[in-house]
Amino acid sequence: VALEKFARYFDVEARTVPVSEESRYVLDPRKALEYIDENTIGMFIILGSTYTGHFESVEEMSRLLDDLQARTGIDVPIHVDGASGAFVAPFAFPEHRWAFDVSRVVSINASGHKYGLAYPGIGWVLWKSREYLPKDLIFELHYLGGTEETYTLNFSRPACFVIAQYYTFIRYGYKGYAQVMNTCLHNARLLSVALEATDIFCVLSDIHRPHGIKGHSTANIKAARELFIAESNKDYELHDPNQNLPYNVGVPVVSFRVSDEYLRDHPELDQDALSTMFRVRGWIVPNYELPRDCNNTYIFRIVVKETTTEDMVDNFLQDILWAVSTLEKISMKEHNVLSHIPQPSYHTIPKLARHLTNLGAREKKEEEAEEEGAKPAQRTKPAASGTLYDRIVGTYLRHKGSLDEVKRKSKGSGKDLFSHTC
């Protein structure tokens, strides 16, 4: 949206390069060359894709632009949109080259309210040197007791955001920011590995996979799981960026969807309905569409921040399994509420939401009754011992076993044998 606003305000033609599954939903540098001509004023490279959290390759794009200039004389500078990634890369991936150490990068922007740990309402822009900030964009003010230069599109604003950012810089320092980013990445990897362990979801983000390995496949799932378990047992300092070296670079974002294999066996598992059920449990996880060249693919996206803990990941996984289990139960009942909503949309979701909210309230009462001493029906709590990963995977296996048993018993019985199993 920021790029589109700039293009509209300054009457500039914005040539957007399509992304695809083959490009891992980010810019393909070689394809980008096809959109450049003698009128191109710059390249816009994103450090932390909105969709999947991937870093676009600033260094590769710079090399290709060097080659283009040698062949054609066309000189194209790079602006790095580091809205999310500019506050992650310096602390978690200090060896990754993306900033002014890449020759063609002349400007960088970053959002203080994302991984800058400040309030919403502050952003930063840096130029490599003064020569890259056009004089025509600079205005001088002389009525505030001196000469002041400004180049923003707005005027008077509160100072609280700047003060908050200054405080976080002083309070956390380099080690503090590194510790926060490493913790966010660890929890994002934990969530990614656990989602893949369910055999229900396909994870599109790659931050949990070994460096250089990308994409969803059986071999990649196994490699990511083994790497995560091995690295989790190592004794790193919390601020040590070396713990990220075995993994792909990116921001702590987890993007996933229901896998094609699971949908073939469970066509009732609509992602709009799942998103609504997440809300029933208190999680706001939107289901939104990838760009138009990605075959009408819809994904869930979770941004893992400094407030996310392992317990939250654990609770979210429990609620995901509850949501999947509940949709399967609904579809198996003789009166299927989804039968009146073949393809739930944003217009029909409120009706489904009311039903699921009531269902969630009944489930909560059952849980409270169990805690007061009632005998639980087919309910197995996670073991108190073992790693969080083991407990999450174990819970899924128990959930799947219970559900399969319910399906087996319910064939031809005409009875409602369902119970809360997660």
Image (spheres, grey):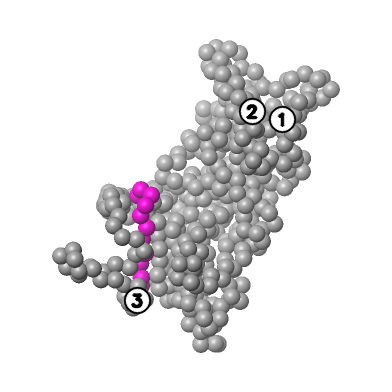
Most extreme residue toward the top is: 373
**Taking 30 as reference, is 47 above or below it?**
above
Residue 51 image offset from top left, x and y in percent = 56, 55
**Taking 392 as reference, is 9 above or below it?**
below
How crowded pointer 2 is (Cα within 10 Å; few <14, some 14-19, many 20+) is rated as few
Q: CA distance from mark 3 to mark 2?
A: 59 Å
Q: Which mark is residue 136?
A: 3
Q: Quadrant of the C terminus?
A: top right
Report the amino acid beneath label 2. Answer: His
Residue 61 image offset from top left, x and y in percent = 52, 73
Report the amino acid beneath label 1. Answer: Val
* In the image, residue 246 lies in the stretch drawn in magenta: no
* In the image, residue 125 lies in the stretch drawn in magenta: yes
Which of the two labelled residues, at mark 1 and mark 3, occupies the earlier sequence position?
3
- For label 1, the residue is 337
Residue 24 image offset from top left, x and y in percent = 61, 60
How crowded pointer 3 is (Cα within 10 Å; few <14, some 14-19, many 20+) is rated as few
* Tag 1 and tag 2, C-beta contact below 8 Å: yes
Q: Nearer the viewer, mark 3 or mark 2?
A: 3
Q: CA distance from mark 1 to mark 2?
A: 8 Å
Query: Is 257 on the left-hand or right-hand side of 279?
Result: right
Residue ID at (59%, 68%): 17
Residue 19 image offset from top left, x and y in percent = 61, 63
Residue ID at (82%, 24%): 411
Q: Which mark is residue 355?
A: 2
Which of the two labelled residues, at mark 1 and mark 2, occupies the earlier sequence position?
1
Magenta residues, as a range?
A: 117-129
Q: Which residue occupies the foreground of this view, 418 or 177?
A: 418
Q: Secondary structure at mark 3?
A: helix
